[in-house]
Image: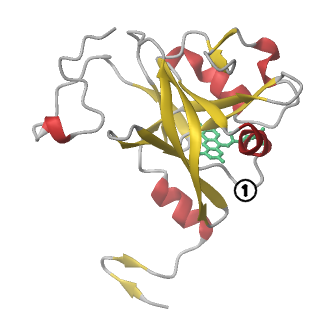
Amino acid sequence: MSHSPYGTSDFTSRQFRTAMGQFCTGVTVISTINGDGAPVGFACQSFAALSLDPPLVLFCPMKTSRSWKVIEETGKFVVNVLANRQQEVSATFGAPGDDKFASITWDQSPAGLPVIRHCLTWVECDVERVEDGGDHHIVIGRARTLGEVLQDKPLLFYRGGYLSTEHPRVHPADAELEEFLTWNGTDTWL
Ligand SMILES: Cc1cc2nc3c(=O)[nH]c(=O)nc-3n(C[C@H](O)[C@H](O)[C@H](O)COP(=O)(O)O)c2cc1C
């Protein structure tokens, strides 16, 4: 046993989850269409913007994810960034289900993939690379099409529960913002 005032290296899986749960994230639904033309998807917090040039994103599906099996076949997916009012959507896609889209209003992306109505924005991607990540895969995707941006509050996930920000507009971080991959800046293309 190695205990120190600064932490422990003798931790359980539960303790690891608790520690990781201190990191607040947004919530996405990663979606695609299967060979029968049916939409599939799963709730995913392990999403990140990865690279500006080329435009890359990443997400990490469990190796047992049924949606991942379909994405692996199609080689395409949409990242739907959820708004705060979409907690039910997150719950639906965060649990196993045969027809998760049954209660969802959705449209088609240019490649015919499901885009969930009222999400903050969406990005259609091609799978570029898949790396091993323990009991997860690390999937790197190249952004092909960007959806429009909705002015609404994001859905946040923190300590295993949902959170909302008070205000959708936040103070800019005091840093070299031009270098930031997720800087909003003065980009008014939408
Ligand atoms: C808020 C939230 C975030 C989640 N994040 C992930 C994630 O990053 N990776 C993952 O594999 N599963 C994640 N899950 C769990 C999956 O959504 C869940 O296991 C789902 O049933 C998988 O569905 P599928 O087997 O149809 O793909 C998350 C669930 C919730 C509710």
Decide if residue 66 is on the left or right side of residue 180: right
Q: Is residue 46 visible?
A: no
Q: Residue at x 53, y 42 (%)?
A: 141
Look at the image and tell me whether residue 62 can be seen: yes
Q: Residues within 10 Å of mark 1 (few under 14, many from 20)?
A: some
Tag 1 residue = 63
Residue sitting at x 44%, y 89%? 2
* Left or right, 107 with reference to 153: right
Q: Residue 40 location, x and y as percent?
A: 77, 29
Name the residue: 55% across, 59% down: 17
Indicate the quadrant of ligand 1 in the picture.
top right
Residue 184 in which image quadrant: top left
Q: Residue furthest bottom?
A: 1
Question: Is 96 on the left-hand or right-hand side of 182?
Answer: right
Q: Image point 81% across, 37% down: which residue?
A: 96
Left or right: 112 in relation to 60: right
Q: Position of residue 12 (x, y in %)?
A: 59, 73
Residue 92 percent across, percent down from the top left? 73, 26
Three-letter code for the amino acid on which mark 1 is drawn: Lys
Q: Position of residue 47 (x, y in %)?
A: 50, 41
Above-or-below relation of 148 to 159: above
In the picture, the quarter occupied by the C terminus is top left
Query: Label 1's element?
Result: loop
